Image: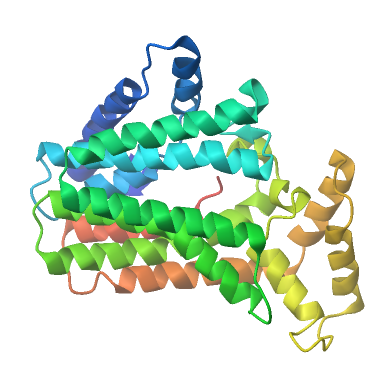
Amino acid sequence: MTTAAAGFPLPDPELAERLSTRLALVEERLRDSVTNTDALADRASRHLVNAGGKRLRPLLTLLCAELGDSGRPEVIDAAVVVELTHLATLYHDDVMDSAPLRRGAPAAHEVWGNSVAILTGDLLFARASVTVAGLGPDAVRLQAETFERLCLGQLHETVGPTGDADAVQHYLQVLSDKTASLLATSARFGAKFAGCRPAVVEIVANYGEKLGVAFQLADDVIDLTSDGTVTGKTPGTDLREKVPTMPALLLRSRVASPDGTETGTPADAALVALLDGDLTSDEDLATAVDALRGHDVVAETRAQSVAWARDAVAELAPLPSGPVKDALVSFAEALVDRTA
């Protein structure tokens, strides 16, 4: 029998029920954490919390805590911290990417403008910092290091590869910093505050790091292949805003190697020209999405995602067999198999 927590299938029904109950507590704490006496700050801070979401980062924290004493109150605090941090980055990302939708609702900057959206993200970072301070100096340091990697990932995505740097490898480093770092911290927090041995904490952190890259590569595929009414995002937004994604980078690498040698087909070159053109209109964007969706670089990106997930699961080898390890394997498989 397979049951679910936060929409992710878990093989053990008792574990799934326990995680669902604790996720409900995290949700309650999240809503308390974003409450503000200032009316505008309150509405803007609640905007994305109320829009819902997968809550995969707190779920990973709670799941890894099952390797130790998962009932410790610090575990719930840690789960709240990672989701607040994630929500804060979404406010900033949507401004930088000019994304019109998030989780099926208008992005915050579409409702209140860029300045309010950015400041709301800052407010959520502040709330996360208040909560993490209660977890001790080690947690504060780790949160700061994670925040630094998040910023570096966004910075390097914004400026792109420099000199003769390989664009694909540069992008993988961006994913590692911008996405994987917080998943690694989510896993680390769960095991750490459940009292697990340092070796176990490192195992799940390495798992979370590799899983984060797999997750984002899967997102690159989903952005092209899924219905926007399911994902809550406009398909091809990254293409429109010229934000790099793996399918586009793989296509470009086929058209021209670093020394300028053409290796792709004329159709590949034409598709790159289409992607480099003006995609302001919805019609032009849909044409570009359809063209790239049908290219085999999408399948190649999915294969990369599956490989990273497989490597993440391999990190779990030293853990004892049982429902928690099985759940971590199922979690990795679900992240790359999802359609939204």
Location of residue 112 in the rendering, given as x and y in whole percent from the top left corner: 62, 21
The residue sitting at 80% across, 81% down in the picture is: 256
Give whichever of 296, 72 is nearer the camera.
Answer: 72
Decide: is 92 above or below 115: below
Direction from residue 216 to residue 198 in the image, left or right: left
Residue 16 x/y as whole percent: 25, 42
Any part of residue 107 in sight: no
The answer to whether 25 is drawn above or below residue 250 in the figure is above
Q: Residue at x 52, y 40 (%)?
A: 90
Quadrant hosting residue 276: bottom right
Percent x, y of residue 186: 30, 51
Q: Which residue does the image show at 23% across and 45% down from the upper left? A: 62
- Residue 143's x, y, as percent? 30, 50
| Residue nearer the viewer, 214 or 326 | 214
The reply, left or right, for residue 302 in relation to residue 196 is right
Quarter of the figure with the C terminus: top right
**Above/below status of 209 relative to 135:** below
